[in-house]
């Protein structure tokens, strides 16, 4: 049976940042105990639609702010996962954490329960930028979080940073990146700020109260970051992600890429559990009900459960079957995000029984002509220009 990944969504935050369009809520923390119970029930129900225990090699607690959950709640969830799935003994278990929510003791508890990868939302080292983004933490919290995480035994740390803020100066971005590099994480995720419709920041920009970010300046910042990370010994493996090429002192594995996210980019199956979570398994793309209250209600034991077919659960509100053509297109545009790995024609042929050279002959030729893609033996990659204009590439396959 093919190994799956599991994404678990925790839709709670202390404060809702003004740029965020994730499915997350401030002020609903009182729902956490019932939500944790509902999650355990969803895990049990989805696992029991299968005759055999499904092999699992990655688990990702994302949000929201998973680090708002008490350690005892995370332990219960992990326990339920391990009891209901065939989790690989060295499975990657990641948790996203807000540096403003952590203590050393909590991080020790996370490490002791088997969480082995921590992703810290640093965003910036600059106090004015953090205030502008309405983050609840400051740079000192990030330093402490990294020190405590190391003492707790975490050897796979990732830092998330945001660039391309309105009126952000390149000098300030470089300073944040330098301070982040001093913390020596194994992994970086760097994202350009997007002003999402429906967020306060999006509406302030639409009303002219703040300037729109400058896309050319953001592209320069991205290129600068790519150079700085390269010099510091990080290898880019995805448009927004970098990892230390090897870190033999701390961990034997030469590759610290996020295995969970690789599963998405390789268009491989994963279960999405929790309010608003998305999944892709058994040829279906699933979406769960958004509201945490509705989620809890749908999974309450007093509800009469409809029969579920893997990977549907009572929380599923959409399950769209993915035909071969769509799956091939998705495999192309997600795989091309992987800057090192790209999309191999041999693997495509093994998966779909046809060569991508034939299926997408026209699209590929167009992108080669525009110098956005290049061949390396039988593998198609983005060119450096293609990394900057990724959306133009992906649109060809949508
Ligand atoms: S902490 Fe993260 S998930 Fe929560 S509101 Fe801020 S950006 Fe969104």
Image (cartoon, helix red, strand yellow):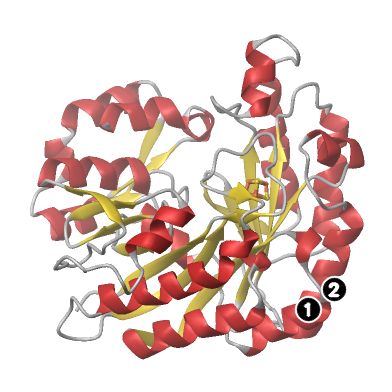
Q: Position of residue 127 (x, y in %)?
A: 90, 42
Can you tell which quarter of the image residue 193 is in? top right
Nearer the observer, 226 or 102: 102
Mark 2 = which residue? 147
Can you tell which quarter of the image residue 53 is in? bottom left
Where residue 189 is drawn, which disc sits there? none
In the displayed structure, does residue 397 sit left or right of residue 83? left
Mark 1 = which residue? 150
Residue 340 in sight in this render: yes
Q: Which residue is drawn at 86% across and 60% down?
A: 141
Q: Is residue 364 above or below residue 186?
A: above
Name the residue at the front extreme: 302
Q: Where is residue 121 in the image (x, y as percent from the top left)?
A: 70, 54
In the displayed structure, does residue 328 sit left or right of residue 111? left
Name the residue at the top extreme: 208
Q: Position of residue 120 (x, y in %)?
A: 70, 60
Q: Which secondary structure, mark 2?
A: helix
Q: Residue at x 12, y 38 (%)?
A: 358
Q: In this view, does 108 lie above or below 291?
A: below
Quadrant, the N terminus: bottom left
Can you tell which quarter of the image residue 316 is in? bottom left
- Mark 2 C-beta closer than 8 Å to ligand 1: no
Residue 248 in sight in this render: no
Quadrant, the C terminus: top left
Q: Which secondary structure, mark 1?
A: helix
Asked if marks 2 and 1 touch (Cβ < 8 Å), the reply is yes
Nearer the observer, 191 or 305: 305
Q: Position of residue 334 (x, y in %)?
A: 36, 45
Q: Which residue is drawn at 77% across and 64% down?
A: 101
């Amino acid at each position: 049976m093919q190994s799956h990944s599991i994404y678990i969504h925790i839709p709670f935050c202390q404060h809702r940042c003004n740029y965020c369009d994730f499915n997350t809520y401030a002020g609903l923390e009182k729902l956490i105990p019932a939500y944790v119970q509902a999650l355990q029930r969803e895990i049990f129900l989805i696992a029991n639609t299968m005759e055999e225990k499904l092999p699992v090699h990655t688990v990702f607690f994302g949000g929201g702010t998973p680090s708002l959950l008490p350690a005892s709640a995370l332990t219960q969830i992990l326990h339920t996962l391990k009891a209901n799935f065939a989790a690989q003994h060295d499975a990657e278990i990641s948790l996203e954490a807000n540096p403003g929510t952590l203590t050393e003791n909590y991080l020790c508890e996370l490490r002791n329960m088997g969480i082995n990868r921590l992703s810290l939302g640093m965003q910036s080292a600059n106090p004015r930028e953090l205030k502008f983004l309405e983050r609840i933490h400051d740079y000192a919290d990030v330093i402490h979080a990294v020190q405590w995480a190391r003492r707790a035994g975490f050897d796979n740390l990732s830092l998330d940073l945001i660039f391309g803020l309105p009126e952000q100066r390149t000098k300030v971005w470089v300073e944040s990146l330098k301070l982040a590099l001093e913390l020596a994480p194994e992994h970086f995720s760097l994202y350009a700020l997007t002003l999402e419709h429906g967020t306060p920041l999006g509406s302030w920009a639409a009303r002219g109260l703040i300037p729109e970010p400058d896309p050319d300046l953001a592209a320069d910042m991205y290129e600068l970051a790519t150079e700085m990370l390269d010099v510091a010994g990080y290898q880019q493996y995805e448009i927004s992600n970098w990892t230390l090429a090897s870190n033999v002192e701390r961990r034997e594995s030469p590759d610290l890429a996020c295995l969970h996210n690789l599963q998405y980019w390789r268009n491989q199956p994963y279960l999405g559990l929790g309010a608003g979570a998305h999944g892709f398994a058994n040829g279906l793309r699933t979406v769960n009900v958004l509201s945490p209250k509705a989620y809890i209600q749908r999974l309450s034991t007093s509800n009469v459960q409809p029969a579920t077919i893997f990977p549907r659960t009572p929380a599923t509100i959409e399950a769209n079957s993915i035909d071969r053509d769509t799956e091939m297109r998705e495999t192309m545009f997600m795989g091309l995000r992987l800057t090192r790995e790209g999309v191999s024609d041999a693997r495509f042929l093994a998966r779909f029984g046809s060569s991508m050279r034939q299926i997408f002959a026209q699209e590929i030729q167009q992108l080669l002509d525009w110098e956005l893609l290049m061949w390396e033996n039988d593998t198609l990659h983005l060119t450096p220009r293609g990394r900057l204009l990724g959306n133009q590439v992906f649109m060809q396959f949508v």
